[in-house]
């Protein structure tokens, strides 16, 4: 069970604290957190996480406004700062907990949560179902074999290759059902096959370590020695070429 919170702010004091943690300015149009950040001190409490994606996330969003997504797993426990179960909190109270964890001084938290942030909450009790292990036969195909007048749509139908938890998945299942049942000679948009392309996977690794070659990453002595062996063995091969093209080797 998860609890979601969408928090929008343009307050310079809050943005300075974000930059201090992320080492990136959320207003520069680039990815800020690079993924979901879990608050270690919150693990035994709300189990709070947060993320800031590339801004703006919405066409009508003000260029100076930053949208922060917050998540929590333990909705029945008290927070570290807000001594209350998260599921019983207002958006402003949830915001206070987040401000506390990013280092805002306690005498400023309530004022900033009230006047500097616009907070919306959303309960999603079944959201974890998306991430449970499953087999191909666990979910119905969009158009089951032999079906002529019904189909399954949305995130809990099975369509090849695509990743659930996206808007595109729901749209694609709708298109697939209509085109199939009405015999429309039109293809559903292709799914980007990145998981089958080693070049894309290596490139993703390069971005995951802040666009650095492997040699610049902090490694243990054993890892450094292993890296030396690997780079020596792949020298002059296609693997070396792929690693260089991805940026992982200079």
Image: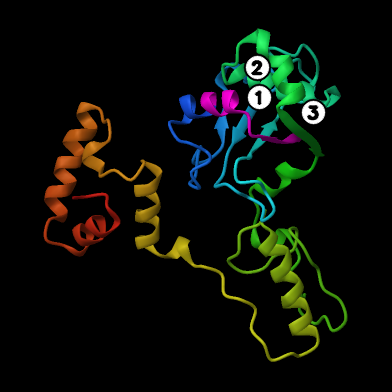
Callout 2: helix, strand or loop?
Answer: loop
Q: Give the quarter of the image for residue 40.
A: top right
Q: Is residue 94 visible?
A: no
Image marks 2 and 1: residues in contact by CB distance under 8 Å: yes
In the image, taking residue 148 as reference, residue 158 lies left or right, namely left
Extreme residue toward the top, this view: 107
Q: Tell which tag, 3 or 2, sits nearer the viewer.
A: 3
Q: Where are the magenta residues, as a range?
A: 1-17
Residue pictured at 20% horizontal, 38% vertical: 226
Percent position (x, y) of residue 69?
66, 37
**Relative height, residue 196 to residue 67 (above, below):** below
Q: CA distance from mark 3 to mark 2?
A: 21 Å
Q: Nearer the viewer, residue 60 or 153?
A: 60
- Quadrant including the N terminus: top right
Q: Give the quarter of the image for residue 136.
A: bottom right
**Relative height, residue 248 to residue 86 (above, below):** below
- The numbered mark at residue 47 is 1
Residue labelled with disc 2? 44
Callout 3: helix, strand or loop?
Answer: helix
In the image, taking residue 208 as reference, residue 163 lies left or right, namely right
Percent position (x, y) of residue 63?
60, 46
Residue labelled with disc 3? 91
Q: Tell which tag, 1 or 3, sits nearer the viewer.
A: 3
Callout 1: helix, strand or loop?
Answer: loop
Q: CA distance from mark 1 to mark 3?
A: 17 Å
């Amino acid at each position: 069970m998860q609890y979601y919170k969408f928090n929008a702010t343009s307050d310079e004091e809050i943005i300075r604290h974000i930059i201090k943690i992320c080492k990136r300015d959320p207003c520069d149009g680039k990815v800020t957190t690079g993924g979901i950040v879990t608050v270690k001190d919150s693990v035994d409490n709300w189990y709070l996480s947060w993320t800031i994606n590339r801004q703006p996330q919405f066409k009508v969003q003000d260029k100076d406004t930053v949208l922060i997504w917050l998540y929590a797993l333990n909705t029945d426990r008290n927070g570290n700062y807000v001594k209350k179960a998260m599921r019983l909190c207002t958006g402003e109270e949830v915001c206070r907990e987040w401000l506390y964890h990013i280092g805002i001084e306690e005498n400023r938290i309530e004022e900033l949560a009230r006047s500097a942030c616009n907070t919306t909450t959303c309960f999603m009790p079944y959201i974890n179902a998306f991430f449970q292990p499953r087999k191909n036969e666990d979910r119905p195909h969009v158009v089951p074999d032999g079906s002529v007048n019904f189909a399954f749509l949305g995130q809990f139908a099975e369509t090849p290759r695509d990743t659930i938890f996206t808007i595109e998945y729901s749209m694609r299942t709708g298109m697939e059902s209509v085109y199939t049942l009405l015999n429309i000679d039109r293809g559903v948009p292709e799914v980007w096959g990145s998981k089958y392309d080693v070049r894309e996977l290596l490139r993703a690794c390069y971005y995951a370590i802040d666009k650095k070659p492997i040699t610049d990453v902090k490694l243990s002595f054993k890892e450094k020695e292993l890296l030396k062996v690997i780079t020596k063995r792949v020298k002059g091969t296609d693997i070396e070429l792929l690693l260089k093209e991805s940026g992982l080797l200079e």
